[in-house]
Image (cartoon, helix red, strand yellow):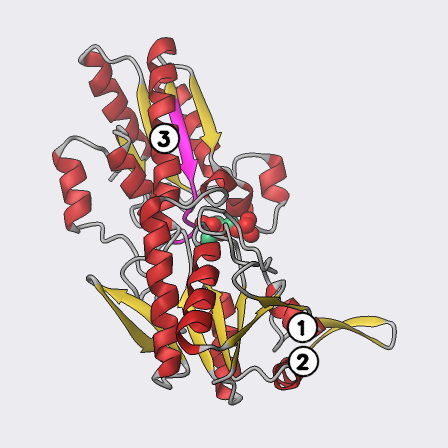
Amino acid sequence: IKRIGIMTGGGDCPGLNPVIRAVTKTAISQYGWEVIGIRNGYKGLYENDWVKLDGDSISGLLHKGGTMLYSSNKDNLFHYLVEENGEMVYKDVSDVGVENLKKLDIDVMFIIGGDGTLTSARDFARKGVKVIAIPKTIDNDLASTDTTFGFNTAVGVATEALDRLHTTAMSHHRIMVLEVMGRYAGWIALHAGIAGGADAILLPEIPYDIHKVAEKIEERKKQGKNFSVIVVGEGAKPIDGEVVVREVIADSPDPIRLGGIGLKVAHDLEKICGNEARATILGHLQRGGSPSSSDRILSTRYGVAAVKLAVEGKFGNMVTLRGDTMSYDSLENVIGRKSKNVNPNGELVEMAKAIGIAFGD
Ligand code: F6P
């Protein structure tokens, strides 16, 4: 190996810059490789948009959020929107990506991303590109690895938000609802809810009955606590399955992504319990900004382990964390596996219930 490429794809996540830094530092200082950063994810691979990375370009990156290489969210070179005879059409342009890597003399491509990005990484591996994949998601729902960087930071931001909501909830005898990210899995809601002392946690994995949540609020009132704080994962669903709350959301092709379930929960609880309710949608505050210290360490571990995989010639694999050991799994296995969800009967949920947190079930 003489020269490697590195790119970030999909939504950003605290820890991306530390991974880029770790791969680049190890590659240069331990092995003398050259490092090329492909900008804007797969879009940049198609457009041949790159930058050389060296000690100077990665200096001061460790604590910075986002990705210095930029990202493009939904670009997939196997199904890419291009102009042809004056019309926009989807085409497989992956050969252009492979050619561009050849032109740049890139021997190994390090691809950092979530489900979508890594599906394309697998497809490039199938076309003979030597790929090393690094998983990324704040949602922590990738099946093949125990913990992804970004998750700890997101939980920290959500926990701080809950702490702040507590004091204002108490002052005004209100119900405060915090909607957090997690489209398919409720890990952020569960962890932040426990750490932030929520009275109820609503998760995609446990359909909730709003009346059971209201019972919890009423129980607290009887104890003289005329306020409550509820955390809701954005993918949470009521047992009757109704999610749409506002016309604007009804119009959206992707209502959950606009934010909304938190508003519905606040609205319904205000009606049932009579306390004023307010909803806060935490949104991308969970994704932006500085990674926590543990995410800086975790992403550095992922980066260094990724370089080790390349040195050992283990291409077509994704770096994983199993227990406290860095390991790997093949992209063929990783892709298509069901996402890692909260177990409604697992120890964490049981523990939360034991200390009185309601789940609406
Ligand atoms: O998958 C990570 C995630 O942060 C989800 O929790 C959330 O639903 C989604 O990305 C938001 O994506 P976008 O930035 O495209 O709105």
Going by the image, does 212 lie left or right of 11?
left
Q: Quadrant of residue 316?
A: bottom left
Q: Which is more toward the observer, 333 or 13?
A: 13
What amino acid is at disc 3?
Glu
Q: Secondary structure at mark 1?
A: strand
When the figure is inspected, residue 4 is found, relative to residue 269, above or below; the finding is below
Reading the image, the residue beneath label 2 is 93
In magenta segment, residue 127: no
What amino acid is at disc 2?
Val
Q: Secondary structure at mark 2?
A: loop
Label 1 and label 2: CA atoms lie apart by: 7 Å
Numbered circles on residues, count: 3
For the point 53% across and 88% down, the residue is: 127
The magenta stretch spans which residues?
Answer: 176-184
Label 3 and label 1: CA atoms lie apart by: 40 Å
Reading the image, the residue beneath label 1 is 80
Image depth: mark 2 or mark 3 in front: 3
When the figure is inspected, residue 3 is found, relative to residue 322, above or below; the finding is below
Q: Quadrant of residue 358?
A: top left
Q: Earlier in the sequence, mark 1 or mark 2?
A: 1
Reading the image, the residue beneath label 3 is 160
Q: Secondary structure at mark 3?
A: helix
For the point 51% across and 89% down, the residue is: 128
In magenta segment, residue 180: yes
When the figure is inspected, residue 298 is found, relative to residue 284, above or below; the finding is below
Going by the image, does 83 lie left or right of 329?
right
Whole-percent x and y of residue 295? 35, 50
Q: Earlier in the sequence, mark 3 or mark 1?
A: 1
Going by the image, does 347 lie left or right of 331?
left
Q: Is residue 186 visible?
A: no
Image depth: mark 3 or mark 1 in front: 3
Label 2 and label 3: CA atoms lie apart by: 44 Å
